């Protein structure tokens, strides 16, 4: 079943399919959140927010998923959890004033962040296979020496130059896209 089947099931409230989504995906999300300063309750909250956010975006914007639904859902959960951790870091508690970020603003920021991720992935698909491979290794923090050992490149300098050129090409593609300006940091 493709990702759009799951999107439609979320929007229509199909409890059997939603239960299946939980069965397949929740353990992985819970493991990620618990390993990253969270607990089971946090995982449940993030999973619910992610499903709600995905359903709302599909209903409102008609989003399409070109990757696996499971991977898409996990990425949304991961982004929401990172945003949650960053929010807790930025809160300052003074005895007289406690500033809390509104949930609506937080959700809007999460949606923008997800759209940025989608634009990045879409543009990554447009660059050459060689650049995709090099950037995937680079973004996975693979040491340059290991990249040289596993590719046809002859030195770390050559790999660094290739990474630079591929990142430049990816950046140009992203900046040329009409969605770029609306997704930039304000």
Image (spheres, rainbow, N blue to C red):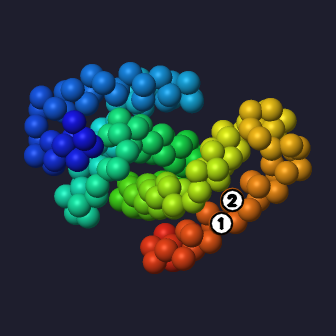
Taking 183 as reference, is 161 left or right?
Answer: right
Residue under numbered circle 2: 166
Q: Marks 2 and 1: CB-CB under 8 Å?
A: yes
Quarter that holds the C terminus: bottom right
The answer for how far apart the CA atoms under marks 2 and 1 are is 5 Å
Q: Secondary structure at mark 1?
A: helix
Residue 186 makes an appearance in the image: no
Q: Residues within 10 Å of mark 1 (few under 14, many from 20)?
A: some
In the rendered image, the vertical position of residue 149 relative to residue 56, given as above or below: above
Q: Secondary structure at mark 2?
A: helix
Residue 162 makes an appearance in the image: yes
In the rendered image, the vertical position of residue 16 relative to residue 11, given as above or below: above
Task: Give the residue at x 29% y 55%.
Answer: 64
- Tag count: 2
Quarter that holds the N terminus: top left
Task: Give the residue at x 62% y 71%.
Answer: 172
Q: Residues within 10 Å of mark 2 (few under 14, many from 20)?
A: many
Locate residue 67, reporting x and y percent: 37, 45
Locate residue 24, reporting x and y percent: 30, 24
Residue under numbered circle 1: 169
Locate residue 35, reporting x and y percent: 56, 24
């Amino acid at each position: 079943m493709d990702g759009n089947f799951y999107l439609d099931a979320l929007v229509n409230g199909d409890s059997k399919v939603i239960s299946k989504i939980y069965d397949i995906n929740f353990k992985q999300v819970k493991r990620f959140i618990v390993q990253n300063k969270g607990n089971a309750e946090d995982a449940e909250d993030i999973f619910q927010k992610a499903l709600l956010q995905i359903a709302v975006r599909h209903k409102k914007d008609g989003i399409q998923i070109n990757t696996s639904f499971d991977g898409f859902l996990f990425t949304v959960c991961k982004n929401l959890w990172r945003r949650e951790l960053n929010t807790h870091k930025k809160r300052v508690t003074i005895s007289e004033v406690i500033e809390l970020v509104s949930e609506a603003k937080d959700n809007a920021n999460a949606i923008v962040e997800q759209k940025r991720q989608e634009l990045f992935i879409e543009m990554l698909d447009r660059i050459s296979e060689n650049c995709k491979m090099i950037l995937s290794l680079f973004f996975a923090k693979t040491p340059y020496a290991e990249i040289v050992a596993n590719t046809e490149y002859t030195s770390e300098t050559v790999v660094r130059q290739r990474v630079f050129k591929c990142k430049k090409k990816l950046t140009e593609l992203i900046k040329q896209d009409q969605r770029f300006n609306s997704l930039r940091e304000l």
